[in-house]
Image (cartoon, rainbow, N blue to C red):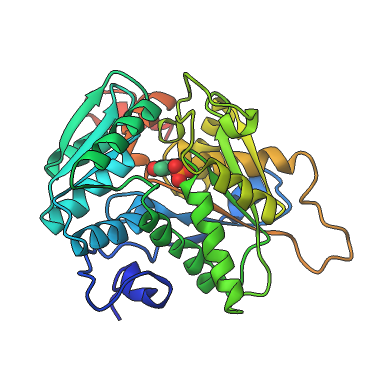
Amino acid sequence: MNWPGIIEAYRAFLPVTEKTPVVTLFEGNTPLVRASRLCEALSLPIDLYLKYEGTNPTGSFKDRGMTLAISKAKEAGAQAVICASTGNTSASAAAFSARAELPAYVLIPEGKIAVGKLAQAMIHGATVVQVTGNFDEALVLVKEIAQKYPITLVNSINPYRLEGQKTAAFEICDQLGHAPDYHFLPVGNAGNITAYWRGYKDYHKLEKISLLPKMMGFQAAGAAPIVLGHKVEKPDTIATAIRIGNPASWKEAITAAQESQGKILSVTDEEIIYAYRKIAALEGLFCEPASAASVAGVIKLSKTGIFDVGARSPRPMRMVCTLTGHGLKDADFAVGKCKQPVTVKANINDVLKVLGL
Ligand SMILES: *Cc1c(COP(=O)(O)O)cnc(C)c1O
């Protein structure tokens, strides 16, 4: 059977009716990849899986929330949609709006988004405005515009975004046959950790799973307001998708961590880049720098020994890390982190020499 997209696949769990016009790009149904090489190479005593959201139609998990937000906007008769974005929200909003025949307006922090994401917003026909400020400032502006005009805000404060995003937790339970012991993910505006927790709780209430995971959120050290307990005026990290100093779902993220007995912590840019390279080199999955904050968190915590289970435990801890977006969105960043290719004349001896053959 062809995958029908997340609204049809999980219709019973979502706020839609027969009247809702479903705008879909057949998002969701992303791979859950067992990361045994990574565990072996880094001596992680755990059973680790990577939920690779880079295979969504626009290359990030934002599509799960956007299919619902745009469908509901269409149902409500919105005349346009608007968002502030570190890149992926605008890419997704632009694509789904194109399909829904709705104009999209996106505000992005000037010079701080990956070029692939900018390209997506532009090619899908969104009106792109760069602001000489950061994401948090752009979000204040779009909120004000959405209040004054018949334009729907599609940032994650739009309640339909999180409802759509929670389907990733359903998929993980369906794929594994149960919930993991721990779920790790990067935290920016903190919507996704909130959505996953809601998804796991929905499945638990219906007794589709018997245990709930501990939710482990990771911010970048230079953009870690939740960890620090105060807003960060000038958030700074190479992980541009989580370069946020005043998360919209701040309280909800703390609730998710507390209710699940998890934590919200931070990782440095160096730790993020290390994980980013290892995921690509050992597992064949190319993710965004921000996505790698989840695996960086696992590596960091494993050093404290908290995942070492006693000899009487029947099995190692099961963990899932969400890889939130595709690495090709920021190809320049990857190229800059690697050894540059050697150039030789087009002759066999020169080629063999550099190949060491
Ligand atoms: C949006 C985004 C995040 C952060 O998700 P929040 O819901 O804002 O916490 C992380 N990684 C990528 C690739 C994203 O696009």
Q: Residue at x 39, y 32 (%)?
A: 355
Depth order, front residue of 40/56? 56
Identify the image quadrant of the N terminus: bottom left
The number of discs equals: 0
Image quarter of residue 298: top right
Q: Residue furthest front?
A: 148
In this rendering, does residue 339 appear at all? no
Judged from the image, the quadrant occupied by ligand 1 is top left
Q: Residue at x 64, y 28 (%)?
A: 228
For this view, does 245 lie left or right of residue 128? Answer: right
Image quarter of residue 134: top left
In this rendering, does residue 199 appear at all? yes
In the picture shown, does residue 331 fall above or below 23? Answer: above
Give the image location of residue 109, x and y in percent: 31, 25
Image quarter of residue 125: top left
Give the image location of residue 183, x and y in percent: 61, 54
For this view, does 297 lie left or right of residue 64? Answer: right
In the picture shown, does residue 310 fall above or below 42? Answer: below
Give the image location of residue 342, x and y in percent: 33, 24
For this view, does 78 lie left or right of residue 302? Answer: left
Q: Residue at x 54, y 70 (%)?
A: 202
Depth order, front residue of 127/296? 127
Give the image location of residue 346, x and y in percent: 21, 28
Identify the image quadrant of the C terminus: top left
